[in-house]
Image (cartoon, helix red, strand yellow):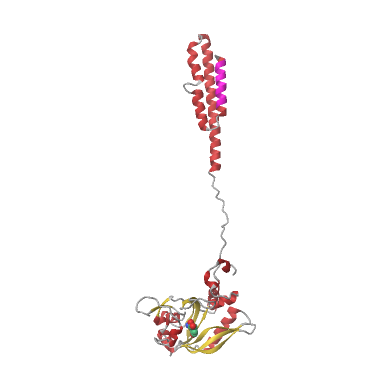
Amino acid sequence: MIDQITRQADEAAAAVESAATLADLQQVESDQLGRSAPLTLSKRQLGSIPVENRKEAGRALNEARRRVESMLEDRRRTLADAERASRLVAERLDLTEVPPAVEAGHAHIVTQAWEELEDVFVGMGYEVAEGPEVETDWHNFDALNIPAGHPARDEFDTIYVNHGKAGSTLLRTHTSPVQIRAMQQSEPPIYIVAPGRVFRRDTADATHMPVFHQIEGLVIDKGISLADLAGTIEVFTERYFGPGFSSRLRPNHFPFTEPSAEFDIQRPDGSWLELGGCGMVHPDVLRAGGVNPEQWSGFAFGFGIDRLALMKFGVDDLRELFTNDVRFLRQF
Ligand code: DAH
């Protein structure tokens, strides 16, 4: 009997040791300690063995059960630890910060030119002003001394907006209407530049786009003369283009200025670049803006930004600025 109990206990111990998972171990427990386990059956035989052996066999059975129970306990702890460890590995989240895969971009070359122009004028004491892209025909034309029927209206190839009375609302054809809005909004002295988008009915080609950018300048103060205008253009030229560049004014005509001029920039190699228009603000335009021409005078200028960006970055087709091909844009 004792031998039988020892063998059963050894077999139970071996089964416990070979259980590979907690589920296996549970099965081993019921096989080795349950109702039909060998040790349980041995216990039932106790009553049928000779009395003098019963006590010793009973003690041996109790010890065997305790041994198997404590081995089960150890094995359970070992398997539970192992299962927890492998779950931690499987469920591990890598929270290490990885540098982003995208590179930082940069401002579009038109934006770069726009912001540099603003910087130069702000450095000269100007403020940056804005106006709406959808304008009234009054601000875009009438107030700028271009009444209905004036030939200059046709030259602008205006895109009209279907809003209000026919022809009363349009996409601004130039930044000049911001002159009127600036005068209406604040009392002189006024020193502003107004960069922005303008629109014309034009077919896209290397030098034309239906949407492009201009910057407008307006100065209204006491005793402003043509000499102030010429001096301002000259200082701007040196600061924006750099040393060795200079400017000149050539007589021209614009309805909103009198006298009017075109201004050109001379490069260090002696060649000329036609940049924009300028002049002394016409008295009618001052009046349209609510400014008394007897008290105040001023000058205005306006030119395209896109062409400056093309020149600066050596690009020869205006359309490149609008296709937004990153392979092109990345170069700058
Ligand atoms: N607005 C004109 C244009 O788009 C440019 C211009 C000319 C603006 C003379 C001015 C100016 O302020 O005085 O062609």
Residue in view at x 50 percent, y 32 percent: 23
Number of disc labels: 0
Considering the whole magenta stretch, tell me its main secondary structure. Answer: helix
Residue 35 is situated, as x and y percent measured from the top left of the image, at 46, 21
Visible in this render: residue 54? yes
Residue in view at x 52 percent, y 9 percent: 52
Residue in view at x 57 percent, y 85 percent: 264
**Above-or-below relation of 100 to 43:** below
Q: Quadrant of the C terminus?
A: bottom right
* 118, 158: nearer the viewer: 158
**Above-or-below relation of 30 to 153:** above
Residue 143 is situated, as x and y percent measured from the top left of the image, at 41, 84
**Above-or-below relation of 103 to 186:** above
Residue in view at x 50 percent, y 24 percent: 31
Residue 327 is situated, as x and y percent measured from the top left of the image, at 58, 66
- Residue 320: in magenta span: no
> Quarter-wise, where is residue 137 in the image?
bottom left
> Magenta residues?
3-15
Q: Quadrant of the N terminus?
A: top right
- Residue 8: in magenta span: yes
Which residue is situated farthest in the right direction here? 269
Residue 280 is situated, as x and y percent measured from the top left of the image, at 49, 88
Visible in this render: residue 218? no
